[in-house]
Image (tube, rainbow, N blue to C red):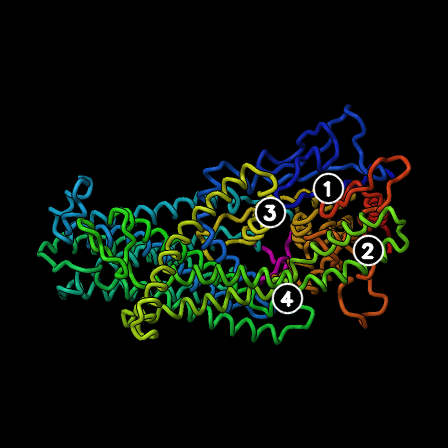
Amino acid sequence: MARDVVELRVHGVSGVRPEALLDHPVVVRVAGDRSAGFYRPRPGFGVTTGPAGVVIEAYHWRNLTVGTVARTVALLFLLPFMFSNLAAWLRPPGGGGAVKALCRLLGATVTIMFVLAVAGVVLDLIGWQCVPYRPCTAGRGYLGWLADLPIGPRLVVLAVLPAAAIRLVWWIGSRSARAFEDFQVRHGTSGAPAGDRLDADGFWRGEALVGRLRSIHVAIAYFTLDVSVLVALTARSPGAMGVALLAATLLLLTACLVLLCLPALNAPHSGWDWTRSVIRPLRGAVAAVTALTAGYALLARRQVPVGGALPGFALTVNSVILGQAALLTVLAAVTVWQQRRAPREARAFFRGLGTPVFGAISVGLSATFTAGFVYRAADVLDRGAIPGPEHPPPPGAPPLDPPIAYRWDALGALVTVLLVAVVGLYAGRFTRRGRERLAARISQEDFPDPPPEAVARMGTVRRAISRARLAEQFSPLLIVYLVLSLLSLAFTALDLAEIGPTQLAQRVAGGRRTFVGLAAYLIDAGTISLGLIVFGLLMIGVMAYLSPEVRRAVGVLWDLGTFFPRTIHPFAPPCYAERAVPELARRVSGLSREQKVLLSGHSHGSALAAAAILQLPPEALRRVGLLTYGSPLRRLYGRLMPAYFGDDVMREIGARVGWRWRNLWRSTDPIGGAIFSTRRPGGRRADPADRVDVRLRDPRSVTVPPTDTVPPPIEAHWPYHTDPHYAAAVAELAGSVDRPG
């Protein structure tokens, strides 16, 4: 085969080094940089060509999603924002304007909960409850001096900390944007359609929209902080200026929420966006309102009656949580209605509830971080006593009392984790028999007459196939999580009547101490579990950096969560694909001017390759072929994100490359699968999609070959490029690229 064909290999999540991807000991970077580069075998060090004599090249983008331990752990605290951003991309096909608007509102509530968490510790627990109580400041000189300040100046001084936290998140978002979203390439996609599609011109250039969304969320955060201060000062000592300032702040906060729902932000790639002219006045309004709030608090030196919790704070927390429950309910209704209108093959595998489920995960993580942070801070301030009316404070301990809604969050987190774990175990055991029957049938077809000495090996193969089918069985688990999350959020409505879990248990049980004590212990266990969940996430973050096994397990979710542009929540981790996809498309487009290109993607790399294909100009597509292997395009992405990786999109990709596409897959692969051969019978005659999928038998044999000492290994998800069928697919595609007809 002539050397006029370049096989460009793209790795998957937690990708292998370029040396392993190219199967060559010495490589050299020919384009790109250390973060994401293109590598080829170094001449003079053995064979530098691939199957059929093609030139081999690797795109190594792993460094875009990895970093130091500190960076990995820091990004874990952005998980609520990441899931909030990801939720909208899991919507069913059809109009996505309503779903995006609801998801942006839900993301705004996550931002508000972030501010309320810091304000709840600094303004409520410290400034309002702890400082006036002498036993709380005893031996704490860093807090004692605050007691000499009037309540207004004290709140202003303490509000510096939540304001700094907002500024930190703002800085992290703008700094990460410069890493990926400001990456500019031009490869000639003029004439591409507009809209919310992977092939839209500008789909992977969201830096302008993300900047405007960031300004809106920062405004929401500062307005939330201003409202907390103003409500505390005006609730017990109202004044005309304070009430007017509070009304103006609430009006501006409402305007920001309305702004998130406007079509100009729901269709960011249409090329016309008038919201740019709104951002500058909004920033000015934030500065003015915050300055006026600080000035009002500093001038309000009269003593405001202090006692109990921060006025209005518990009501604010409760209102936000109930708003989240309402948004998730509406979101579930909208997505189910849209899915019922979608074609049968485009329906998601857990009934179209991917968007509200991931929204519930975002809300759940936000509640876990918030309640865990508030309870641990209260635990430190009250010198080790678990806060709450169920436990009378010991002598010398301050009677700190976080909002009742946080107690419901703690109880809901415990119950949700336990029930989801039980359902998960039940789902795995309930589906085992069906998976084992399927595995037995597949292994029998692959190895119809195994010799007696291969019986044990056949059992190993059947177990591998059965385990590989486990991912599809956890759809009920996600539904259960969504229902429990909605119930947990709805129960916080009892906070409006100041009814906590123990008070409810007392009323239901008729005052019997056994049930009341059980409820108190469950709340204690819930508060402890919140801390354990946060600690567990920290350990996962550290292990994901240190352990390749953990990194591969976490990498699928992480790289999926940061694959799409953060045009829903601007505080989410940065979108690496905003560099990877345009860069890959430009490289393919440039190579196609002089050579033929076979774009080869493994696992998640097949998603990058597919997105790059949709960004290529027509003159380049004529000289491009596509090879995917271990690909989750249909099995995972097509089901989770049917609006972006559905059957119509896969057919569009096949048509653009002239159906010069082969997809290799194995039944033992827990991630990859077929792309077209899973569709129902009775389809189109002479359908070119029927030739795309090529199933590989794994293992290649269940007996020991004459030249070996052990049976061939079960390769499952990796490697693919060592299989003889891989070389045959490369040779076939290399010969068909740019061939007439």
Cα separation, mark 2 vs mark 3, equals 26 Å
Query: Which residue is more in the foreground, 603 or 548?
Result: 548
- Residue under pointer 2: 443
Of callouts 3 and 4, the N-terminal one? 4
Is residue 225 left or right of 353 when viewed as pictured?
A: left
Mark 1 vs mark 3, foreground winner is: 3
- Residue under pointer 3: 553
Cα separation, mark 4 vs mark 1, equals 32 Å
Q: Does 242 appear above or below 583?
A: below
Mark 3 vs mark 4, foreground winner is: 3
- Which disc is residue 349 wearing? 4
**Amino acid type of the residue that numbered disc 3 sits on in the rendered structure:** Ala
Query: Which residue is more in the foreground, 250 or 725?
Result: 725
Mark 2 vs mark 3, foreground winner is: 2
- Which disc is residue 555 wearing? none
Cα separation, mark 3 vs mark 4, equals 22 Å
